[in-house]
Image (spheres, grey):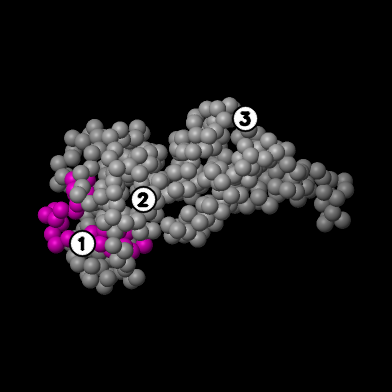
C-alpha cells in the first residue's frame, strides 16, 4: 500500500483508480509517471490531507499532488468522469475492475474509439490509449483546442505516452490531428528532415525518431525522452565539410533544453537528456578517439544510458550492429583499465616495471 493510499484511507476517503491508470492495470502494463484517482470527497478535503495540493485546471483532474491527479466526486460509481474510457476504474485494494462505460468488448479487442464532448480531454485520453496498440489509429479527426494546454497537461501527455508500450502510436495520433504542429513545432519539423536512403532507409527524421522506440529494452523515461528529442537539431543544422547535419547534436541539446523547460520537466531529467543528446554521436567514434578525449565522458555515470541511446539510434536505421558492439567493447576495455592501478586508461603500463609511479 502506497503512502498516498494510506493517507486517503486514514482520512476515511473512498477512492478508485480511473482512466489510463486502471487500463494499464487491466492489461498488466507498467504504470505511467502519474496516477489518476477518483476520490469521494471535495478538493477542500484533499487540501487538508496533502500539503501543497495544486489546482492546475486539468480537463482530466481537479487537483494535483506530486504524481497523483485527482477527480473529486460525490459518490463513486454514479458520477460521470467524462466518458466510457475514463469511467473504467479499479479498486487498488481489491484489484477489482468496474466497467461503467460498457467497454469490455472493445478492451478485449483493443479497439479504442474514445467519445468525449471536451476536445482537451478527448485528445489527452486518445493519445494515451493509442500507446496500448502497435498500429496507429487510422481514423483521426482534427481537434480544435480552445487554447494552448498548460505545461502540466503537456508534460503528463508526453511523458505518459513515452511510458506506454507503443509511444509512436500516440505521437502519430497527435501528429495527424494537428496537435504536434500547433504545440510542439520542434518535433513537427522532423517531418521535413530528408534523410539519405543509404544511411536512413527507414525514412525521414520523424519516421526515424518513431522507429527508435521499438528498440528500447525498457521504458526508462529519461532514455525515452532523449530518443524523442535526439535529432531535433537537424532542422537547424547545415551541411558542411561532408557532414549532412553538421553540429546537429549540439544544436539539438540546446533546442531540447528549451523545449523541456517550456513543459516544466524536472531539472535533473533536463540535464541528463541534454547530456545524452549533445553526445549521442560520440559512441561511434569511441574505438578510434584518443582515450584522453573520452575519459571524462566514459567515467560519467550517465554513459551506459548514452550507449543505449546509440544502440536504439543505430538499430532503427537498419545499420550493421557492428558499430554499436565496437563501441561497447571499447567502453568496457577503458573502464577495466581505469580500475587497474597499474595501467593507464589506454592500457599502457604506469611508471616503470609494470608498477604505478606512486609505488616507487
Is residue 129 visible in this depiction of the protein? no
Numbered circle sitting on residue 322? 3
* Nearer to me, 100 or 4: 100
Which residue occupies the extreme left position in the image?
A: 78
Rendering coords of residue 235 (x, y %): 54, 43
Q: Looking at the rendering, which quadrant does residue 325 occupy?
A: top right
Q: Is residue 342 above or below residue 199?
A: below
N-term-proximal mark, 2 vs 3: 2
Q: Is residue 138 left or right of residue 299?
A: left
Is residue 100 highlighted in magenta?
no
Residue that mark 2 sits on: 157
Rendering coords of residue 195 (x, y %): 54, 33
Q: Nearer the viewer, mark 2 or mark 1?
A: 2
Q: Nearer the viewer, mark 2 or mark 3?
A: 2
Q: Is residue 88 left or right of residue 196?
A: left
Residue that mark 1 sits on: 72
Cα distance, mark 2 to mark 3?
36 Å
Q: Looking at the rendering, which quadrant does residue 329 occupy?
A: top right
N-term-proximal mark, 1 vs 3: 1
Mark 2, residues whose alpha carbon is within 10 Å: few (<14), some, or many (≥20)?
some
Magenta part of the chain: 61-90
* Nearer to me, 339 or 184: 184
Rendering coords of residue 1 (x, y %): 30, 57
Q: Looking at the rendering, which quadrant does residue 166 occupy?
A: top left
Mark 2 lies on a secondary structure that is helix
SS majority, magenta: loop
N-term-proximal mark, 2 vs 1: 1
Mark 1 lies on a secondary structure that is strand
Report if the CB atoms under discs 2 and 1 are less than 8 Å apart: no
Cα distance, mark 1 to mark 3?
54 Å
Amino acid at each position: 500500500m502506497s503512502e498516498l493510499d494510506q493517507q486517503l484511507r486514514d482520512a476515511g476517503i473512498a477512492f478508485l483508480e480511473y482512466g489510463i491508470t486502471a487500463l494499464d492495470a487491466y492489461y498488466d502494463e507498467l504504470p505511467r509517471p502519474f496516477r489518476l484517482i477518483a476520490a469521494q470527497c471535495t478538493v477542500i478535503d484533499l487540501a487538508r490531507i496533502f500539503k501543497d495540493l495544486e489546482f492546475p485546471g486539468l480537463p482530466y483532474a481537479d487537483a494535483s499532488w506530486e504524481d497523483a491527479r485527482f477527480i473529486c466526486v460525490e459518490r463513486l460509481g454514479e458520477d460521470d468522469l467524462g466518458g466510457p474510457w475514463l469511467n473504467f476504474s479499479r479498486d487498488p485494494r481489491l484489484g477489482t475492475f468496474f466497467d461503467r462505460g460498457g467497454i469490455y468488448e472493445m478492451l478485449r479487442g483493443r479497439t479504442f474509439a474514445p467519445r468525449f464532448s471536451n476536445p482537451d480531454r478527448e485528445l489527452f485520453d486518445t493519445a494515451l490509449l493509442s500507446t496500448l496498440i502497435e498500429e496507429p489509429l487510422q481514423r483521426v479527426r482534427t481537434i480544435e483546442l480552445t487554447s494552448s494546454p498548460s505545461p502540466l497537461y503537456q508534460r503528463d501527455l508526453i511523458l505518459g505516452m513515452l511510458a506506454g508500450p507503443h509511444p509512436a502510436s500516440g505521437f502519430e495520433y497527435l501528429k495527424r490531428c494537428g496537435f504536434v504542429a500547433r504545440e510542439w513545432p520542434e518535433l513537427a519539423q522532423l517531418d521535413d528532415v530528408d534523410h539519405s536512403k543509404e544511411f536512413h532507409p527507414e525514412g525521414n527524421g520523424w519516421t526515424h525518431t518513431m522507429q527508435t522506440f521499438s528498440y528500447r529494452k525498457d521504458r526508462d523515461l529519461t532514455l525515452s525522452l532523449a530518443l524523442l528529442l535526439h535529432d531535433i537539431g537537424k532542422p537547424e543544422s547545415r551541411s558542411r565539410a561532408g557532414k549532412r547535419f553538421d553540429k546537429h547534436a549540439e544544436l539539438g541539446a540546446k533546442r531540447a533544453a528549451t523545449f523541456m523547460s517550456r513543459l516544466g520537466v524536472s531539472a535533473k531529467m533536463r540535464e541528463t537528456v541534454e547530456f545524452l543528446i549533445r553526445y549521442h554521436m560520440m559512441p561511434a567514434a569511441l574505438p578510434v578517439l584518443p582515450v584522453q578525449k573520452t575519459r571524462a565522458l566514459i567515467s560519467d555515470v550517465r554513459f551506459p544510458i548514452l550507449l543505449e541511446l546509440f544502440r536504439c539510434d543505430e538499430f532503427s536505421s537498419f545499420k550493421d550492429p557492428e558499430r554499436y558492439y565496437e563501441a561497447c567493447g571499447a567502453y568496457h576495455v577503458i573502464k577495466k583499465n581505469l580500475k587497474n592501478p597499474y595501467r593507464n586508461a589506454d592500457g599502457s603500463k604506469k611508471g616503470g616495471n609494470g608498477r604505478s609511479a606512486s609505488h616507487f
